[in-house]
Amino acid sequence: MNNDKVREPLFHIVKRDNFSTKRAWIVRAVAILLALIVCAIVTMLLTGDNPFSIYATIFKGAFGTPRKTWITFQNLSILLIISLALTPAFKMRFWNIGGEGQVLIGALASAACMITLADKVPNWLVIVIMIAASLCAGAIWGLIPAALKAKWNTNETLSTLMMNYIATQLVAYFIIVWEVPKGSGTVGMINANTNIGWIQVGNKYLLSIIVALLVTIGMYIYLNYSKHGYEISVVGESERTARYVGMKVKKVIMRTMILSGALCGLAGLLLVGGINHTITTTISGGQGFTAVMVSWLAKFNPITMVFTSLLIVFLGRGASEISTAFGLNQSFSDILTGIILFFIIGCEFFITYKVNFRKSVKEDKENV
Amino acid sequence: MKKLTALLLSLLMVVSLVACGDKAPAASTEANAEASSDVKVKMGFICLHDENSTYDLNFINAAKEACEKLGVEYVIKKNIPEGQECYEAASELVDDGCNIVFADSFGHEDYMIQAAKDNANVQFAHATGTKAHTEGLKNYHNAFASIYEGRYLAGIAAGMKLNEMIEAGTITADQAKMGYIGAFTYAEVVSGYTSFFLGARSVCPSVTMDVTFTGSWYDETAEKEGANKLIEGGCVLISQHADSMGAPTACETAGVPNVSYNGSTASVAPNTFIVSSKINWAPYFELLINSVKEGKEIPADWTGTIATGSVQLTDLGTVAAAGTAEAIEAAKAKLNDGSLHVFDVSTFTVEGANLTSYMADVDTDAAYEGDHEVIVDGYFDESGAAFRSAPYFSLNIDGINLLDTAF
């Protein structure tokens, strides 16, 4: 690729260095417009429904009533917290695919406290223990793969992924221990009459939103203005450099994964103690994986992440509204979400890189 | 570049917020206007999955049928998990002007109760739930059907098939072993397979049955594997209580006759499908709608029966034995006039002894404590009017062999 004398491939991919912000802006706007046009065509071809009324319904699904708006922001908060949790690990080039398991184990710890401590200690103490337990549980779930990586250089993508399955099966096991009535396979609402361990601030949606706000600001400061944050980015850029300047790489990896896991555990705490008041194996709903995309889409910037997670939540909420209003299958709205994300992620590629075709070749290949 | 993404997305968000401000008040006044007129009924449905699950499809079809018959507006929300999402979905339906909200899955119950407490002027109904009779809310109701009677009749079809196989010499009387794939060791499943077994034994006295559990209401692979395991273990006829096509498909491949649930599976198993029992929810939905229209009270617990049209059998498959339809009709008549009871204590034993007394866990509690004597007039009164609509028969009777009870 560097030398013109070797046989020239069909096209080169070259990193852009002088792309003006204005042009990047235009590319993104065009990408979203194109995505909407493609969605409109797909909608008309497959269903015959008016695409504009579908767009209006997506919007109504996310912000149509005050309640819907609150729920949207609550969902946004949970996804944002998980995304922020994964970010320091990613920035360090530690592929933490275990968000799902870290959230679940935090959720399990919260549920365990609510069920076993309800009639033993006062409510405030239950809540304090819940917070400590879920943060610790998440931290341990993050620390195990980090320690394996630091000690024996195991592949963290695999080990974090495997930890997800262990967490899911542990939750499944405890559901059968706690199920009511016998054999039903559901725990039901925990402490429905006493509300012990239910954490609430103001209305029932507000707590997650406040926590997400604090975590966002905290993470922004931590990554950009703290010594730890600096160490994370150096380790991420080059482990050798970090070692050369005297950083304890193993310590940084483990410390960062404790933080990453603990924040996931916090999301689990909010899901059980703040929102659902029950435990199921699907309580996280795949958000541990969605968060990977949110974090990457925002290029690990906590502030941008607010908007990328809003986009994902907005599309998801709109999608379920479409299936209700138009009697379409949920899969249809997933198709639309997929198209939009494809264009958004695709345009980032063309902003960062440009494609040079071999001069002799005249055929114009469509790029996305 | 990061800043630009942020800028663009923030712009999107600002636009959305502005538009939201416009729409929100309009939507809520609309909801108020509709809620205040009490004659006009709008019904909301909450389903755990969508049409791909035979369980939910059965509810969705009945919802459409009942609402269209009575000319009532309706909204169906699908893929609502058994968590706070159910409460939010119910509240959104209320915001949308629904004055009846129905949820179809067991785990929805606690969230429906919460929504019922918050919206006293809206009726909430829930299938398979157990708490309406103890919760004491005027606007929260449970419903189920005496599907054990349907299972019993389907069991007769199975027994007839076994008799045909014995007469043809394909199996001996001792080899008349059936297999059953259940989801969980939950009373609803236990009641279902026991009634199916008793139905089969009423015509084929030598029958025995193996039961295995999958630990999920919908797991195509596990259900298929379960069926294959039972067939390898010598079962010559299979039935199931789980919601995928796994078991019928495995039976079709192995050429083993199958008695199905939730509706006909003849489309995937044309050569092995005998019959299927199912609950038709349309009569209950009509009752809900008419009660609200006329301002009548809805019972806390409602049990649909063969007589109300709630318990149905599909048409017989081509492999059903000769005389099956007549045998089913005869038994159905006896069930209807009360001369036959599915759980007649003289027809089964538990650990070698006939049952004279049993305390069932009718009022749900974490300790699974038995609280009601349910043996009345010589039979186990399943889904009885004096108790609750959801099944509570959870006895392990002789002749049925549980292969695993992990779930």
Image (cartoon, coloured by chain):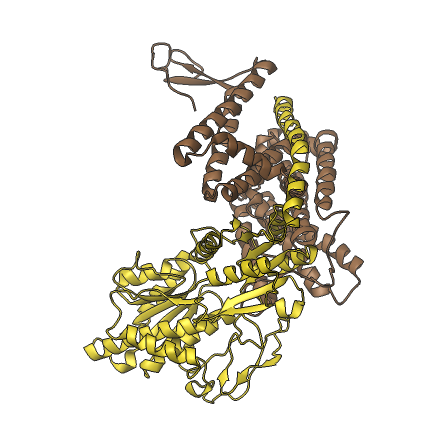
Residue B16, picture quadrant: top right
Give above or below for A120 relative to A68.
below
In depth, the one of A164 and A322 nearer the eye is A322
- Res. B404 visible in picture: no
Tally the numbered discs: 0
Residue nearest the viewer, comparing A12 with A278: A278
Left or right of B235? Residue B7 is right
- In the depicted structure, whether residue B375 falls above or below residue B258: below
Residue A284 in the image: state x and y as whole percent.
59, 49
Q: Quadrant of the N terminus of chain B?
A: top right
Camera sees residue A311? yes
Q: Which chain is yellow?
A: B
Residue under the point 51% across and 63% down: B284
Q: Which chain is assigned brown?
A: A
Q: Nearer the viewer, residue A231 or A183?
A: A183
Which residue reaches farthest left? B168
Picture quadrant of residue B13: top right
Q: Position of residue B119 (x, y in %)?
A: 68, 55
Residue A138: x percent and y percent?
65, 50
Side of A351 relative to A271 (left or right):
left
**Residue B56, position as x, y percentages in the image:** 46, 55
The residue at 74%/60% (across/down) is A196
